[in-house]
Image: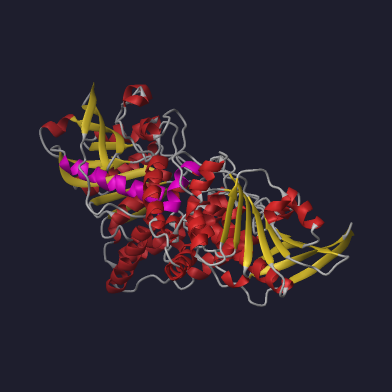
Amino acid sequence: MAEPSPFDLRTRSVAASLRAGDKPPETAEQWGERRKVVLAKMRESCGPVPEKPCDLTPKIHGELKRDGYRIEKITFQTRPDVWVTATAYVPEVAAKEKVPAVLVVHGHWAWARRDPVVQSRSLGLAKLGFFVLAVDAFGAGERHPKPARGTYHGGLMGSTLWPTGHTLLGMQVYDNQRAVDYLLSRPEVNGKLGITGASGGGNQSMNGGALDERFQAVVPVCSVGSYQAYLKAACCVCEVLPNALTYTDEGDVLGLVAPRALMVINASKDGIQFSPAEAERSVSRAKKIYETLKIPEKFKHVVIESGHDYNQPMRELMYGWMTWHLKGIGKGDAIPEPKFNLDTPEDLTIFPNPDDRPKVFLTPTLFAAKVAKEQIKASDDLKPDHPEMWQARALAIRKMVTGVLGLTPILPDARIKTMGEKTEGNFQVITGDLVTEAGITIPTAQLDPKDKEAGRVNLVLHLEGSVDALKLSVIETLKQKKETILTADLRVTGAAKSTWGGVAGAPDHTVAEHGIWIGQPLLGQWVHDAMTLLMIARKTAGNKPVRIIAYGQAGVVAAIAAGLMPEAGADLVLLDVPPTFASDTPYGSGTMMGLLAPGILRAGDIPHFLALNAPKKITVTGSVSLQGNRLNQKEAEAAFAFPAIVSKTLPGGKFTVSTEPFNPQMLGD
């Protein structure tokens, strides 16, 4: 593991300070009050759920007869047009008497619910007389846009949900709650329910047990550590609970399962976020909660000598726990695994041809696009017809954005510390360091013309850093106009780019997730840096004008930063800015996941944030979607219609959108 960067250290410090006051409850009453708070916050973090559950509309697509049980291939609906693909294992004994049921959820195994690792626990439970329902997670297995072995639902696919305020974690939680509804509709099931899974499936098990009291026995495997440990590792989007560390750590989430039965299984050789040492932090707190409630026997923690897995010793412990707490037999000791035969993934497939799935079959991206469309329309419908109307609306947007981004106040006395000077042609190049907040120092570069008094000050932003910013063609134009140029590496960009590396096409995947855990999305942190730079640019300019020029995805940062600081009076020039957060396909490789602040579309889309800058001059030169598609003139005009309307409504407003290549005339005076 690489040495932690200043960004990493700050993130961990913020997390530690947020949770520094946590103390185990001393009474059941104390825990009861704490429990209400954590439950409410956790449900908010998960994202919205329907006011009323839709019809499950279950369908059995086929059956396989096996020795002592049968397999049913099932689909059911959890939200309108959100379909779960599932396998039911029905023991023969269920024909004579009702039996307990276990919901089997999976992590990132190559075949999802059909994977041999997942099949093994399903079959073992069925052989022991449990009704088992194994489900594909949202976007995984047969629920992936293009089902195949090893498909992945995280990265730039699962994160399309974030801007809408939905989360992959929350979608899974709700799917699993509806799976319980389905289980309770089955005549074979006696109402006693358990849930288990490993890795991401263990995460689902913990969350399911915490948020659905119908589970009487919960067994997360190779998944429990601590939320703070996630800040030392990479994880899947499906494991990220936005803002969680602002109100809890994992110990309290485990405690939410109480007074129901909970067994946590860890592997001795697991990654740091699931390591026994990190798990002990959470387990000790959960254990205290169970002891406070005077039910210590309902909680158990076991460490197996193993790597990351759900192997036979782990399964046998789970069998014993489920048998004790769902059947009332034994005391939770391990039960030897019955012999079983695995099926091939092909035999368990419901739709060999994915085109045979329901006509409307929402995947994470299609669901996100549907919700985003509704949210964007709601914002578009608030277009103003007089200045006062927009002024009120702009205040509301600024307030919402500030909250969504978890913005911290900028330092009013922030100054650039000069680190070096040199002459390049007709410009003096001054390099410096700028402390934007405690623990964060960003490198800056300022180019001042030597042979005339500095005129306009231009703040130039690029999410690849200042070196790339100074390579933009617009820089030569600014030099010819003899204007001051200020640029910088926003945190974890340029020279300070994260050493974590990219995941699934997202260059900043891991640091973006870390910001979300502490309630400070990376977009908000970039906006904070940009606002600090804008404040300095304004002071440098004195009574001269200020302009912000931003390239590509940095345009989103610039639009919000300038929109939140109307007092800076900056004109805005955006080159190849994305037109929207909405997407019905995974974001393109290279998309900065840090832009995807959870719930940002509740405040508005990129064009609405651009409009916050009116009546200052706003120029959009080219627009490239987050999928990498370049818009034509007609498409660009339609995409940016909202700021055009606002600019026309406000006296002196001027908005221009062009898809022609940049030319100096686009800068105006």
- Residue drawn at point x = 39 percent, y = 31 percent: 115
**Magenta stretch in the rendered image:** 156-185
Does residue 203 appear in this view?
no
Residue 12 x, y percent position in the rendering: 56, 62
Q: Main secondary structure of the magenta part?
A: helix
**Residue 183 is a magenta residue:** yes
Residue 566 x, y percent position in the rendering: 57, 70
**Vertical arrangement, residue 86 with respect to residue 344, above or below:** below
**Residue 222 is a magenta residue:** no
**Vertical arrangement, residue 465 with respect to residue 74, above or below:** below
Residue 445 sits in which quadrant?
bottom right
In the displayed structure image, the side of residue 42 where residue 459 appears, left or right: right
- Residue drawn at point x = 20 percent, y = 42 percent: 55
Residue 669 sits in which quadrant?
bottom right
**Vertical arrangement, residue 414 with respect to residue 219, above or below:** below
Residue 23 sits in which quadrant?
bottom left
In the displayed structure image, the side of residue 82 where residue 430 appears, left or right: right
